[in-house]
Image: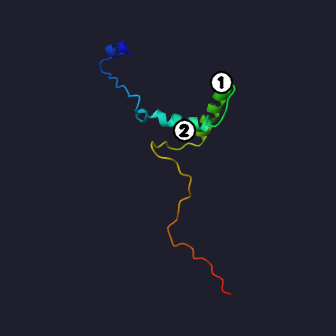
Amino acid sequence: MLLFSLLHPRWEFVFQPKYAAYLNLIEPWWKVLRSLALEGRRFETWAEIEQAVERTTACWNEHKHPFIRGRRRHHRQVRRLGVAALPTISLI
């Protein structure tokens, strides 16, 4: 890396501190991939881990959506504005 920086003076390396992993934009994606593919599962071989990651990545690519940093996806139906339904009252 030192040789590269001497040969390319235009480039400047800015090192990320270890305590600030959130600055690296790939970290949230790794967290999601790890939770979808590996969390709560036991694997006997590396091949099983590779298959789990490949299946998760394929599923992720089939259901494309924008990755917004710092927000969770909420799978909720859009609420319509209006008046709430009145309760039905039966008279005796």
Circle 1: residue type = Trp
Residue 32: image tag? 2
In the displayed structure, would residue 36 be above or below residue 91?
above
Residue at horizontal 69 percent and vertical 26 percent from the top: 44
In the displayed structure, would residue 45 be above or below residue 73?
above
Mark 2: give few (<14), some (14-19) or many (20+) Cα within 10 Å: few
Report x, y in % for residue 38.
62, 34
Report x, y in % for residue 29.
51, 36
The residue identified by callout 1 is 46
Q: Looking at the rendering, which quadrant does residue 6 occupy?
A: top left
Horizontal side of residue 6 vs 68, given as left or right: left
In the displayed structure, would residue 43 be above or below residue 78?
above
Residue at horizontal 52 percent and vertical 48 percent from the top: 73
Q: Looking at the rendering, which quadrant does residue 87 occupy?
A: bottom right
Whole-number angstrom distance, CA of label 1 to CA of label 2:
20 Å
Residue at horizontal 43 percent and vertical 36 percent from the top: 22
